[in-house]
Amino acid sequence: MTPEQRYEDLIEEFVGEDGVLPPPGGSGFGRGALRYRTKIFAMFVRGQLVVKLPRKRVDELVAGGHGERFDANKGTPMKEWFSLDPESQLAWPSLAHEALGFARSISLGAWTCRSPTTQSRGSSRSGRTASSSGSFSITCMTA
């Protein structure tokens, strides 16, 4: 079975799961990606399965020789994205399920960011909160 066929099987397995959207098609980045709500959690890039996982898990997989951090051709490997080596014996569905679980945990607010400042004026999408003096401070943790 080719890697392309394996990815097609993976799509079929995940479509129908709560909140999972099939690849939208078209052109551009993410056109063939599986999404949880709006967040990409698995995609097929340059013949390899790419999944979004917690940084620590990506570190473990890289150290175990199963692949490398994904680089979107920008010269900087991404800390939470893992590209599975085609020769790895790791099962694609189990990695994709891990990635889906991670996407769900982020969506449900399992990762929280708070500002230790006492007077805040609102927050941005990144979780940074501006203090009354205009400086930024951020603290992130798992729930």
Image (spheres, rainbow, N blue to C red):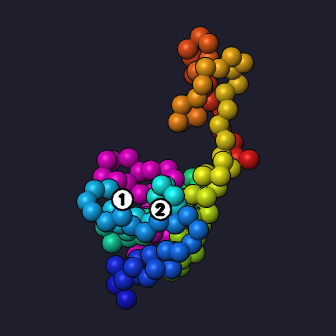
Percent position of residue 99, x then y: 55, 64
Q: Circle 1 is placed at which residue position?
A: 30
Q: Which numbered circle lies on residue 133?
A: none
Coordinates of residue 90 in the picture (x, y in percent): 53, 77
Query: In the displayed structure, does residue 11 sit left or right of residue 124?
Result: left
Report the span colored magenta.
62-88
- CB atoms at circles 2 and 1 under 8 Å apart? yes
Q: What residue is pinned by disc 2? A: 35
Q: Is residue 70 above or below residue 4?
A: above
Determine crowd level at label 2: few under 14, some 14-19, many 20+ residues with C-alpha closer than 10 A. many
| Category of crowding for the residue at label 1, using alpha-carbon neighbours closer than 10 angstroms: few (below 14), some (14–19), many (at least 20) | some
> Which residue is at 36% across, 64% downward?
24
Q: CA distance from mark 2 to mark 1?
A: 9 Å
Looking at the image, is 29 positioned above or below residue 76?
below
Residue at 53% across, 70% down: 96
Could you say where residue 56 lies in the image, as x and y percent from the top left? 61, 54
